[in-house]
Image (spheres, rainbow, N blue to C red):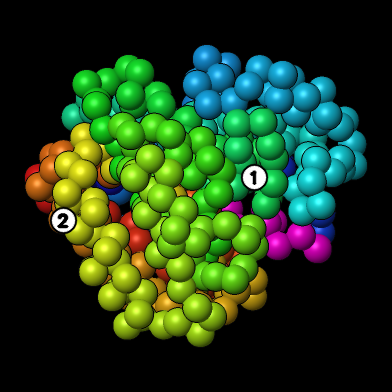
């Protein structure tokens, strides 16, 4: 079985502005990095259905987004977050990719999967767009898995340099979900302290600016991975942001491509033990185009190196 890579050119249409770091070129950079990796299969991402969006988001909120999408130009829904024509479809491709990836992995048609889609999602709350995110793809995929597959427990692992506040807020009262996040603190969005533990199902691993490979790996080895192993989920979902890379302009962690390989392999090894290797990964941040291409390549190569 191969590693599925889901993509769609609708993800190019979302245009938050020519100076915005979350640019359409990110999508092209990721695809250039991952599209020729041995053991992968590229497929177009379907659109998420309304029923899937509403697994997480309030109907009024979704309608507000639909009503706000402009015919031309841009509309701000938050100081950092914009809608252009095509933004809604781009977001629906990203959530649709994540749900389809879940279905394909449970159908035994793929070993694991990576969603090369944008905009990102992990800052979006039930009824709040923020931090470049409109809807929360990993949360939708987790709820989709719980609703439609033989799944009792899902783990979401987030190594984006920013705290996944939206994912945490959505699941902090949901013991069927474990959320582990490593991120730089202090940094946007300001949440993610170690004492934010939800229902006992939230594990935040805050890292100081200038943290490099050693401390990052230590945090996951000593805390994140043992919590994941103990949880024994039926599915693992990765919020794969590559903005903790040393070259990233939006943050000050010092990770290298090899660190993304390392954490991906470590997660996949636990997935082999707990859930037949079922891992779905969804692109979040990453704003240096060269680092985004090379780090996403390292990540997908690690996914594709797994064997049944
Ligand atoms: Zn980020």
Vertical relation: 182 (above or below) 5: below
Q: Can residue 266 be seen in this view?
A: yes
> Tag on residue 269?
2
> Percent position (x, y) of residue 306?
17, 54
Q: Quadrant of residue 11?
A: top right
Q: Do the residues labelled 1 and 2 touch (CB within 8 Å)?
A: no
The residue positioned 36% from the left and 67% from the top of the image is: 260
Which is nearer the N-term, disc 1 or disc 2? Answer: 1
Q: Nearer the viewer, residue 122 or 4?
A: 122
Quadrant of the drawing holding the N terminus: top left
Q: What element carries label 2?
A: helix
> Percent position (x, y) of residue 185?
55, 70
Q: Quadrant of residue 189?
A: bottom right
For residue 175: magenta? Answer: no
In the image, taking residue 175 as reference, residue 19 lies left or right, namely right
Q: Nearer the viewer, residue 5 or 106?
A: 106
Q: Is mark 1 on a helix, strand or loop?
A: loop
> Tag on residue 14?
none
Return the residue at label 1. Answer: 133
Vertical relation: 79 (above or below) 109: below
Q: Which of 5 and 217 is in front in this view?
A: 217
Beta carbon of the mark 1 residue lies under 8 A of ligand 1 = no
Vertical relation: 38 (above or below) 245: above
In the image, taking residue 233 as reference, residue 200 lies left or right, namely right
Please provide the residue range marked out in magenta: 19-27
Quick one: label 2, few (<14), some, or many (20+) residues within 10 Å? some
Quick one: label 1, few (<14), some, or many (20+) residues within 10 Å? many
The residue positioned 23% from the left and 59% from the top of the image is: 225
- Give the Cα distance between marks 1 and 2: 30 Å
> Percent position (x, y) of residue 296?
43, 62
């Amino acid at each position: 079985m191969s590693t599925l890579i889901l993509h769609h050119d609708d993800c190019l249409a979302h245009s938050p502005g020519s100076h915005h770091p979350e640019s359409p070129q990110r999508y092209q950079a990721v695809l250039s990095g991952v599209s020729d990796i041995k053991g992968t299969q590229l497929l177009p991402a379907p659109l998420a259905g309304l029923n899937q969006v509403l697994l997480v988001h309030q109907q009024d909120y979704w309608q507000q987004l639909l009503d706000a999408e402009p015919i031309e130009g841009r509309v701000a829904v938050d100081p950092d977050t914009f809608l252009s024509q095509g933004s809604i479809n781009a977001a629906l491709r990203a959530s649709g990719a994540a749900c389809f990836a879940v279905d394909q992995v449970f159908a035994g048609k793929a070993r694991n999967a990576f969603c090369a889609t944008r905009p990102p999602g992990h800052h979006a709350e039930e009824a709040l767009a923020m931090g470049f995110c409109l809807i929360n793809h990993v949360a939708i995929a987790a709820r989709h898995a719980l609703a439609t597959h033989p799944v009792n427990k899902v783990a979401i692992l987030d190594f984006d340099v920013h705290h996944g506040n939206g994912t945490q807020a959505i699941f902090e009262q949901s013991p069927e979900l474990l959320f582990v996040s490593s991120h730089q603190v202090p940094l946007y969005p300001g949440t993610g302290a170690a004492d934010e533990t939800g229902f006992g199902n939230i594990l935040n691993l805050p890292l100081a600016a200038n943290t490099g490979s050693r401390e990052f790996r230590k945090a996951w080895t000593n805390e994140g991975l043992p919590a994941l192993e103990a949880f024994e989920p039926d599915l693992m979902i990765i919020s794969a942001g590559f903005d903790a890379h040393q070259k990233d302009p939006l943050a000050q962690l010092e990770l290298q491509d090899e660190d993304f390989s390392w954490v991906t392999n470590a997660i996949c090894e636990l997935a082999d033990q707990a859930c037949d290797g079922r891992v779905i990964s969804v692109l979040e941040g990453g704003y240096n185009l060269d680092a985004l291409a090379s780090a996403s390549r390292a990540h997908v190569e690690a996914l594709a190196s797994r064997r049944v």
